Amino acid sequence: MRIINKKALHNYHILEHLEAGIVLSGAEVKSIRSGRIDLGEAYVRILNGEAHLLNANIARFAQSADTAYDATQSRKLLLHKTQINTLIGKTSGKGTTLVPVSIYEKNNRFKVEIGLGRSKKEFDKRRVVKERDHIRRVEQELRGKE
C-alpha cells in the first residue's frame, strides 16, 4: 500500500528523494493501514536538529480509546544526523522546501518518502496538464483504431 501526495507532485519540482522512518502510535498505524491519511497540506521541518512531519492528517482510529487525539499533530521522522545536516544545507536560502511525497509500508514499518522540492510556476503547471491531456488523447485514438 502506497499513499501518494498528488498535491506535492503538482505544486513542486521534486529534485531529490529521501526515505525516512516515522514515529507512530498503534492506533495511527491501524488508521494508515485502512487508508485514512491525508498528506495534502503536510510539510517537513527541521526543529532542534530533528525532522518533523507537520500537518499530516491521520484520522482517529474508530476503536481507539484515546478521546483527546489530535489528527494533525507533529510526528518525528527518523533520519541520520548526517542526512539532517545535508537537508539543512540544501533547504537554507535556495527557495527549496521539504515535502512528503508518499507514505508506504516496508518490512512491516511505515516509511515516508521526502522530496526536496522547488515550487513550480503557474505556466509549468499548465504545461504539465496540457502534455497529460495530449498523451491521453493520443492513447484514446490509438485504442479506437485497433
Image (cartoon, rainbow, N blue to C red):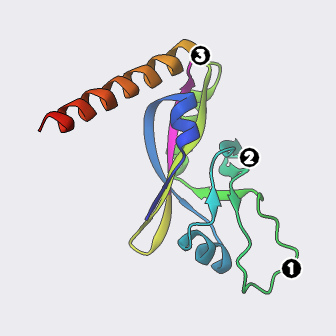
Quadrant of residue 87 within the rendered picture: top right
Identify the secondary structure beneath mark 2. loop
For marks 2 and 3 on the same chain, the one whose residue lies earlier in the sequence: 2
Task: Judge whether residue 135 is colored magenta.
Answer: no
Instruction: Compare residues 86 and 6 and report the one nearer the observer.
Output: 6
Under mark 1, the amino acid is: Thr
Q: Residues within 10 Å of mark 3 (few under 14, many from 20)?
A: few
Identify the secondary structure beneath mark 3. helix
Q: Which residue is mark 3?
A: 122
Distance from Cα at disc 2 to Cα at disc 1:
29 Å
Side (left or right) of 134 relative to 54: left
Q: Position of residue 138 (x, y in %)?
A: 26, 27
Q: Position of residue 36 (x, y in %)?
A: 62, 66
Residue occupying the far front of the picture: 145
Under mark 3, the amino acid is: Glu
Q: Residues within 10 Å of mark 2 (few under 14, many from 20)?
A: few
Q: Position of residue 18 (x, y in %)?
A: 45, 45
* Above or below 20: residue 105: below
For marks 2 and 1 on the same chain, the one whose residue lies earlier in the sequence: 2
Q: Main secondary structure of the magenta part?
A: strand
Whether label 2 touches label 3, CB < 8 Å:
no
Identify the secondary structure beneath mark 1. loop
Residue numbers of the magenta segment: 112-120
Q: Which residue is mark 1?
A: 67
